[in-house]
Amino acid sequence: MFNQAKPSRGQFVVGGAAGAAVAAFSSVNVIAAPMKKVVIGLDVPQTGPYSDQGQDQLRAYKLAIEEINAKGGVMGMQIEASVGDDQTKAPVAVENARRMIERDGAVMITGGSSSATAVAVSGLCQEKKTIFMATLTHSNATTDESCHYHTFRRYNNAYMSAHAMAKTLLTKYGTGKWFHITADYTWGHSVYESLTEVLEPKGAKTIKNVLLPLGTTDFSSALSQAQAAKPDVLVITEFGKDMVNAVNQAAQFGLTKSTKILVPLADEYMAKGAGDNFDNVVTTAPFYWQYHAAKYPAAKKFVDAFMKRYGAPPSNGAECAYTNIYQWKEGVERSGSLDPKKFIEKMEGHKFTATKEPEYWRASDHQGINSCLVLEGVPVKDRANPYAFAKVLEVHDGESVSIPAASSKCKIESA
Amino acid sequence: MEAGPFVRRTTRENEDTTIDAILSQLPGQLLDGFIRGLVYVAIALGLTIVFGMLRLVNFAHGAFYAIGAYVGLVVAEKLGLAAGLIAAPIAVAFFAVVFDRILLRRFYSKEPTSQILVTFGVAIVVQETLRLIFGGTTRSFPIPAALAGSFNLGFTQYPTYRLLFAIGIVLLIVAVYLFIERTDYGLIVRAGIRDRTMVQLLGGNVKLASTIIFALGASLAGLVGAAASPIYSVDPNTGFSFLIPSFVVVVIGGLGSFWGAVLGGLLVGELQSVATLALPAASDVIIYIAMAIVLLVKPSGLLGESEMIRG
């Protein structure tokens, strides 16, 4: 069922077993009518700093595809996945996507984890006139200045997080001296800009922003600067494994005790890795399994199925991956064809309710307008399981925190 | 400039980037660079000794670090950090001896390209085996509570564990130095670096010394891997992320040179740390620039012997 775009390394075994399964099935199909297939590309990091996130999205993709195929597929076609490891690197992600489209005939690419890869793949998909359902990408750029006609991004963006957190930040963190450690690429820049745009007019003083490359393992020099600067707030705009290292090392420098820590975006795996150092830290997420499963039956069904299959709840990126597959399936079925233009017409402005609060796809920039949660980390002893890392402080309606359509820099193509 | 919520600003008027602000942070930053450099030294030392003695370019050195980190993690979770620090170098040394006897020995006299290919291949096998066993998820071992705080040095607060880690590495460097300089094996090793064939002709057991040196280099990486896992998290790719900087260190210091590795490691650590203070975005690339400059000015590295002597 799962083709490997790159049949090497760890996935070889999985690919081989899946290949054998396909062979077994197709021999049955010789007797019955041959099953029609549609290929999609899953382009996620299975190695590199964001591999925890990529692997969890892959689990969600597989779950959604298996569910859909078991119920007859997409318009009678079985979904076949071409999987690639983007290594958390934009050039690799683009090469994977190109191979999926050109060699495997993928009609839709989905993936992300790093906004650098998402923006790059989005550009390729525009050139190739192939649908790109971006998953975990939080930089404003993806649907703002770098938006594309063929790209849809459902995940929250930096602007939404900053505006959702604004009130909490001012009451809980205050307007003192803010020190930033920021991942040096589109996502980090985007979060930094969005946060300072919200905070500085209220009186917060930015004393320094240390930009460090994606994949930094040792944050000690930035942290010892932060220690010398004695800020009131330390903002750690790092993601995946980088965030885990940064927060844990901040604790070693005593900064989690002397300073308030803010992590603008986090997920279950990061909070698990940071353990007690994530206690009391404010963050945002578009989905939180514990909260949404208790509130929405559709979320509970997804979370239960995911836990049953994988023994752990889905991270927020996995939820986006799962819903993206269903959104694509339903869009294809509404348009009655695999033609991207017809699909996009049926997606723009489409309102739906999936695993969380009601949402829609904004036509002007293809941003998913959906809720944004403000969360606060809880100590490990208060977690029912290692992934139950937070309590929900606020739930913001997507509309109220999104970039206003009027001030969007997105100039979307007409085809 | 356009108004509205998205004015892209290139200068941060509030940021304190004056020379005074930078200078006031310099002592803390230099200490950090020194300690960071010691980590590089510890990893590069094994690499350079193995190259010096065996003329072997070992791309599997990072894999030794990763194996040490995982063995340390597993043992530490059950029996505590001290047990992890003992188990890791032993396990890695054992692995290295088996690897050396079964595979690597056949490549000692081959050209560097074959050595790079075979050790790189083993590194990938190790990485993927670790992924099969432990999964791809990032793991870390918490610092024991007694060592978790930070220590006031007057000019800066520095994490206690990192300070102890640094002291441990200094002791390790001294121990390795004494082993090479003061023991009979060390004598064979040093002679072997000069002229392998002559040592064999004089009846020195170069084969045994080779195995010991290889195991020593590997266990150094394994020990550092285990000791560093409470500071850095561990995942199957960890080995590769430490391999590249340690090669840079060895190239800057001079391939095969003991003090070259020490000098190169400290230099790379300080460069990165000071760059993070003055020009953070360049903190990654600066070590490669330094390497390029060294290669242009002194191709054999700062303390490396020239090709003439080595040949």
Image (tube, coloured by chain):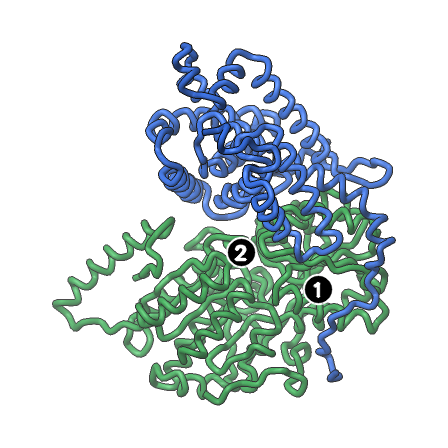
Q: Which mark is residue A50?
A: 2
Of A262 and A119, the residue lying toward us: A119
Residue at horizontal 73 percent and vertical 71 percent from the top: B10
Is residue B298 among the parts visible in the rendering? yes
Residue at horizontal 56 percent and vertical 86 percent from the top: A364
Residue at horizontal 50 percent and vertical 63 percent from the top: A90
Tell me if B28 is positioned left or right of A338 in this view. Answer: right
Q: Nearer the viewer, mark 2 or mark 1?
A: 2
Q: Residue furthest front?
A: B308
Quadrant where the C terminus of chain A lies?
bottom left
Of A234 and A48, the residue lying toward us: A48
Q: Which mark is residue B1?
A: none
Residues beneath discs 2 and 1 located on the same chain: yes
The chain ID associated with circle 1 is A
Tell me if A408 is positioned left or right of B163 in this view. Answer: left
Residue to which mark 1 is pinned: A393
**Which secondary structure lies at badge 1?**
strand
Q: Amino acid at mark 1?
A: Leu
